[in-house]
Image (tube, grey):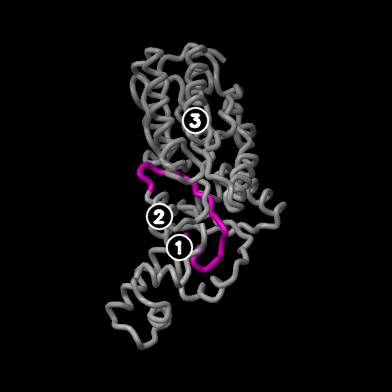
Amino acid sequence: MKRPTIADVARRAGVSKGAVSYALNGQPGVSEATRQRILAIATEIGFSPSSAARALSAATAKAVGLALCRPARTLGIEPFFMALISGVEAELSARSYALTLQVVADHDAEIAVYRRWWGERRVDGVLVCDLRTDDQRIPALEQLRLPAVVIGGPGGTGELASLFSDDAAALTEAVEYLVALGHRRIARVGGLPDLRHTEIRTEAFAAVCRRLGLAEAVTVFSDYTGEEGGRATRRLLSANPRPTAVIYDNDVMAIAGLSVAQEMGLTVPTDLSIVAWDDSPLCRLVHPPLTALGRDISAYGAHAARHLLGVIAGEPATRVRDETPQLTPRGSTAPPGQR
């Protein structure tokens, strides 16, 4: 997991370290074709000219990176990430580490950030969120040999360390609870469909509904915002027959769904039961308070940070299963037609 050096670039390019220095610093002494080849290799392995002097030192950055590919406006209103970051920061500060946070536009930009951070010795390792199917960040990080912990899984994390919870078991528990109350028409408002945890939840929802004979179960996808969650709810509740219970993939969409149901003249939980994922304080402040699948997100962030610090220290990259979200029934769920 050593950082890339000028010698690594020279070896990959088949030239001397002096030629690499000329190319990186824009000096004469190499052909333009060789210069471009050296620059491309340096970018690929995460080495930059500004890292040359510091690469001679074995000192660590004492910082961990977190690049988030989410609109900044959604990060500010989604309790999950605020709690996760607070847990990460608490663990890091106790070890005299800093957190370097950056919002990026897409995964190409995120990979470029990793290369720059690693090449310039900005961070000693990174936390990776929002694991996607066929996620290109995984092979990029493996190639860089940048210490990393993926917050997500299981599966799809390559050789990188990971921390995950059993979302399938939690989703199954929520559906079985609603069925025990007497619900037969259950819908789900999922998150972004290309996220790995969305895929896991979708598969678990379909499997438990098949097993319990819920032929009218349906999942619609959204983007975790209240606006899109509200639109998805309006479409579901305008159907005939409409669902008598809806499970939401986060608390923000669940609260928006509660508002839409009340706007459409439906009473929660008499006409519609609601279950939220991520039991934030928001779930307890609305009326009725929301039944929710919850866990200690701050502790989850702290566990991820601790796992990453272990990887940075040279511990093996392992896959760790964290606490499974637990269902907490509240006033938003009841048997169909009953308060």
Amino acid carrying mark 3 in the image: Asp
Q: Which mark is residue 115?
A: 1
Amino acid carrying mark 1 in the image: Arg
- Looking at the image, residue 287 sits to the left or right of residue 216; the answer is right
Question: Answer yes or no: do the residues labelled 2 and 1 have beta carbons within 8 Å?
Answer: yes
Q: Position of residue 191 (x, y in %)?
A: 43, 38
Q: Which mark is residue 242?
A: none
Q: Which residue is mark 2?
A: 140
Q: Residue at x 39, y 86 (%)?
A: 27
- Give the number of marks: 3
Q: Is residue 230 visible?
A: no
Q: Which residue is mark 3?
A: 167
Q: Position of residue 105 (x, y in %)?
A: 42, 57
Under tag 3, what secondary structure? helix
Nearest to the eye among marks 2 and 3: give it. Answer: 2
- Residue at the far right: name it: 94
Please determine whether, in this image, residue 299 is positioned above or below residue 246. below
Q: Residue at x 57, y 42 (%)?
A: 80
Q: Earlier in the sequence, mark 2 or mark 1?
A: 1
Nearest to the eye among marks 3 and 1: give it. Answer: 1
Spatial separation of the CA atoms under disc 2 and disc 3 = 26 Å
- Looking at the image, residue 109 sits to the left or right of residue 2; the answer is left
Amino acid carrying mark 2 in the image: Ala
Q: Earlier in the sequence, mark 3 or mark 1?
A: 1
Q: Start and end of the magenta stretch? A: 114-135
Under tag 1, what secondary structure? helix
For label 3, count other residues whose C-alpha is less than 10 Å away and answer few (under 14), some (14-19) or many (20+).
many
The image quarter in which residue 6 lies? bottom left
Quadrant showing the C terminus: top right
